[in-house]
Image (spheres, rainbow, N blue to C red):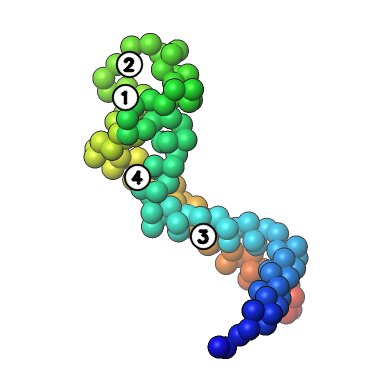
Amino acid sequence: MLFDSNTAKEVVKGLLQSATQFIRENPALTAWAVAATSGAALLAAPGAAAALLLNFAGFTGTGVQSGSLAAAAHSIIGNVAAGSMFSFLQSAGAGGAAALGTINGVIQAAGAAMFGSGAGMTYLKSNVSNSTTNGP
């Protein structure tokens, strides 16, 4: 065995302390890095994000979930017109390929924007920090 449980705990504790210190000293850099990482996750797995968001709103594979945001909207709308945003979201929630593909594309576009801006700002922020720390 490479590590006993006490050694592993100390290693993890040290890593967490270092990460906490870095976050405290670099909150903006950390925020931009999180945005870039989140954007990369949305680019890589848009379907997971779509399923989570649609189910959270109440658009499920078996229809509109009672007591959800979708149910509240449905009670206000009444009869749902074909081609409406509500019918589009319901189709995506039920696994409709066309609607789900569009939603996945929108999520990937948002992920690309988050990744691009997050990575760019992380790069700029780290270079500005390094140039002011290290001098001209």
- Disc 2 vs disc 1: Cβ atoms closer than 8 Å? yes
Which numbered disc flags the more N-terminal residue, 4 or 3? 3
Q: Position of residue 16 (x, y in %)?
A: 69, 69
Which amino acid type is marked by label 1?
A: Ser
Q: Secondary structure at mark 2?
A: loop
Q: Whole-Å distance between the Cαs marked 3 and 1?
A: 32 Å
| Pointer 4 residue | 104
Which numbered disc flags the more N-terminal residue, 3 or 1? 3
Which amino acid type is marked by label 2?
A: Val
Q: Whole-Å distance between the Cαs marked 4 and 3?
A: 18 Å
Q: Whole-Å distance between the Cαs marked 2 and 1?
A: 7 Å
Which amino acid type is marked by label 4?
A: Asn
| Pointer 2 residue | 80
Which amino acid type is marked by label 3?
A: Thr
Q: Secondary structure at mark 3?
A: helix
Q: Position of residue 7 (x, y in %)?
A: 67, 82
Residue at 63% of width from left, 83% of height from top? 4
- Disc 4 vs disc 3: Cβ atoms closer than 8 Å? no
Q: Whole-Å distance between the Cαs marked 2 and 4?
A: 23 Å
Q: Whole-Å distance between the Cαs marked 1 and 4?
A: 17 Å
Of all residues shown, which one is farthest toward the left? Answer: 97
| Pointer 3 residue | 37
| Pointer 1 residue | 87
136 sits to left or right of 69:
right
Residue at 26% of width from left, 19% of height from top? 82
Position of 108 relative to 69 (above/below): below
